[in-house]
Image: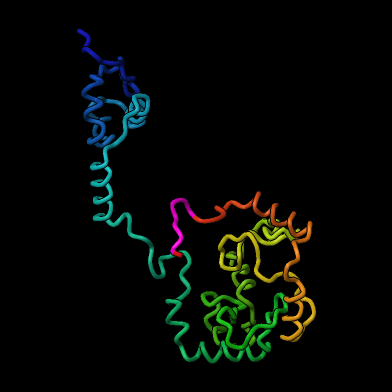
Amino acid sequence: MPIPGASAVPAAQGASAPVRVDLAQFARDFPTTPTSALAKRYGVSPTTIARRARELGLRKGREYRAQLLREKRVAGKMQPARGPAHYNWKGGRTWERFRDPRYLDWRKAVLERDGYKCQQCGRRCKKYERGLAAHHVRSWADAPELRFNLTNGVTLCRDCHMALHGLGPKEVPLIPCACGCGSLIRAEDPYGRPRRFVNHHHSRGRTVSAATRQQLSRNRRGRSLTPEHRRNISKGLRTSSKRIGRPPGARSTR
């Protein structure tokens, strides 16, 4: 006699007939019961159970997944590889190396030998620049005997050093400056913050005295803006994504 709401599930390999399954009971058991236990109960493979659950839109419950994670932690299957077992182990902690007096003396000697100049791009760095690096030609882990050898070091700026380790700066698109000057600028500043214009990036012109500046200011009083200046202001207002003027509901305190 067929079971109400039952469906035929293909039997395991070697069985003679499919197994009749109560779908309502299956839907209740699947979220909280291991797939292997359901496969053993119905005499089919775990793949068949997973496929039928996927067809019915069933998923394991949150409590079941949390319990599974707890069991894996107890069994030690989720512990990350540490120390020499890690694939990128280099012989010790980085902060311990940077505090080693031998490393500090080696780094200072490498930078002084190269004149605080990046040997990759030729950039002249400041003496106490934070990003200046003394890079090991042969890595710290692969050549322990050359860790403090002066010939195994080279001076690199931060950008070149990070690029050498595959962590170079990302490509940033160029955008037109929002001031209307027509020049292209990077869409992000060196710290990764978005920007629309750069302060004082235009040519500064000739240097004049304070008295000359006051005289030029007096000469400009009462003059209207030039047509070109008006066009640039209008273009900036049209293309600006920021609200112009006071926010709604703001009242003057005057």
User: Quick check: is 45 in the magenta stretch?
Assistant: no
Asked which quadrant contains residue 203, the reply is bottom right
63 sits to left or right of 226: left
Q: In the rendered view, would you say 68 is above or below 214?
A: above
Give residue 112's position: percent from left, percent from top.
Answer: 64, 91
Give residue 43's position: percent from left, percent from top.
Answer: 26, 25
Q: Residue at x 80, y 80 (%)?
A: 206
Q: Residue at x 70, y 75 (%)?
A: 120
237 sits to left or right of 230: left
226 or 180: nearer the viewer: 226
Helix, strand or loop for the magenta stretch, by majority: loop
Give residue 64's position: percent from left, percent from top.
Answer: 24, 41
Figure disc tally:
0
Give the extent of the magenta segment.
247-253
Give residue 110's position: percent from left, percent from top.
Answer: 62, 88
2 or 131: nearer the viewer: 131
Q: Residue at x 71, y 75 (%)?
A: 121
52 or 188: nearer the viewer: 188
250 sits to left or right of 75: right
User: Quick check: is 248 in the magenta stretch?
Assistant: yes
Asked which quadrant contains residue 96, the reply is bottom left
Asked which quadrant contains residue 199, the reply is bottom right
Colour scheme of the picture:
rainbow
Q: Residue at x 21, y 12 (%)?
A: 3
Quadrant in which the N terminus is drawn = top left
